[in-house]
Image (cartoon, rainbow, N blue to C red):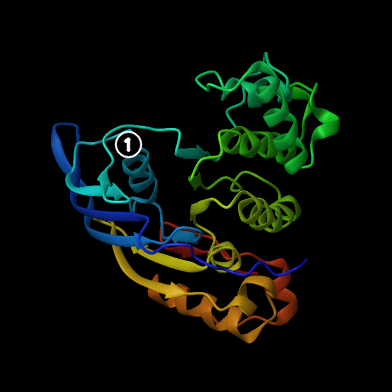
């Protein structure tokens, strides 16, 4: 696969400052996020990694504008985010396709508020199914698609409005290992093709290194940013590269996990997901 060079277009397209986000659970306050400060340049692919409960998904909801009840502010080009908008789209872990619609129909459904003509909508749907490699399955229903194919449709649906920001909430977490590896490469290609700025939430440290131009490492209770790491280009495109192994182990160390460096063969075949502070190795 040809390496995709990271060339941010402008600085600080997205500015996140969340001093506090608290929920009430069974009548008591539970702080989900605290002192989050993050700026993202246009064209970046930022991965967010951390154990369950560190507020990764909550942060995406705030960026989407689905939840505005927090202390702080999120700004795009200086304008405060106060509601959802077509400039932001999300892909979830479950594809959430409508079972009574075909692949084409599911992608087309995302254009219901679009001002495009019928012909322009049809062309956009066709282009995005082609982008994810599913032109031949435009008439297939979700039950007729594999998990990986259904998730590709979900990605096409998210991108068909050409959002400026693509948010991905563990979109590959439910897939088998081989499909997951293939879709990681596909995601890099697709996001680069569309020119979107991507924020990708994951438990999988290998995945965070492979996809991200930067990695945001979060710790839980409440969710905070432990550090932000730049990812060398070589690490994003070669799991046996020393930079990949070094950075992966550094992230695991920041998450409180002490692991021995595996062989290159293990690195290529064994992801290291973090769940509730535990790592699955070997």
Whether residue 115 sits left or right of residue 222 in the image: it is: right
Query: Which of 234/85 is in front?
Result: 85
Mark 1, secondary structure of its residue: loop
Whether residue 85 sits left or right of residue 105 in the image: it is: left
- Residue 158's place in the image compared with 186, above or below, is above
Q: Position of residue 277 (x, y in %)?
A: 41, 62
- Residue 153's place in the image compared with 172, above or below, is above
Could one spot residue 257 in this view of the protein?
A: no
Q: Residue at x 14, y 32 (%)?
A: 27
Q: Which residue is mark 1?
A: 65
Q: Position of residue 170 (x, y in %)?
A: 53, 48
Quadrant where the C terminus is found in the figure? bottom right
Quick one: which residue is furthest to the right in this view? Answer: 136
Location of residue 118 (image quadrant) = top right
Q: Position of residue 88 (x, y in %)?
A: 44, 40
- Residue 96's place in the image compared with 73, above or below, is above
Could one spot residue 197 in this view of the protein?
A: yes
Location of residue 241 (image quadrant) = bottom right
- Residue 35's place in the image compared with 58, above or below, is below
Location of residue 14 (image quadrant) = bottom left
Q: Residue at x 73, y 43 (%)?
A: 131
Q: Residue at x 53, y 75 (%)?
A: 248
Q: Position of residue 177 (x, y in %)?
A: 71, 54
Whether residue 8 sits left or right of residue 268 in the image: it is: left
Quadrant where the N terminus is found in the figure? bottom right
Q: Residue at x 31, y 32 (%)?
A: 83
Query: Which of 257/60 is in front?
Result: 60
């Amino acid at each position: 696969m040809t390496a995709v060079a990271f060339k941010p277009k402008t600085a600080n397209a997205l500015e996140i400052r969340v001093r506090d986000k608290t929920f009430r659970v069974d009548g008591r306050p539970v702080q989900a996020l605290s002192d989050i400060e993050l700026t993202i340049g246009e064209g970046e692919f930022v991965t967010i990694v951390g154990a369950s409960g560190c507020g990764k998904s909550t942060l995406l909801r705030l960026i989407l504008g689905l939840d505005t009840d927090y202390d702080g502010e999120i700004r795009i080009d200086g304008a405060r985010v106060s509601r959802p908008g077509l400039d932001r789209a999300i892909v979830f872990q479950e594809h959430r396709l409508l079972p009574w619609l075909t692949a084409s129909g599911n992608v087309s459904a995302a254009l219901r508020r679009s001002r495009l003509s019928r012909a322009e909508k049809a062309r956009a749907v066709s282009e995005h199914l082609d982008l994810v490699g599913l032109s031949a399955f435009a008439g297939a229903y979700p039950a007729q698609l594999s998990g990986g194919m259904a998730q590709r449709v979900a990605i096409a649906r998210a991108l068909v409005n050409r959002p400026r920001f693509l948010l991905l909430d563990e979109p590959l977490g439910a897939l088998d290992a081989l499909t997951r590896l293939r879709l990681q490469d596909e995601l890099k290609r697709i996001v680069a093709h569309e020119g979107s700025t991507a924020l990708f939430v994951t438990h999988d440290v290998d995945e965070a290194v492979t996809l991200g131009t930067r990695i945001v490492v979060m710790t839980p209770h409440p969710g905070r940013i432990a550090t932000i790491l730049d990812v060398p280009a070589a690490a994003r495109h070669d799991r046996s590269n020393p930079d990949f192994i070094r950075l992966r182990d550094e992230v695991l160390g920041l998450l409180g996990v002490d692991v021995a460096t595996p062989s290159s063969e293990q690195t290529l075949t064994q992801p290291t997901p973090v769940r509730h502070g535990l790592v699955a190795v070997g």
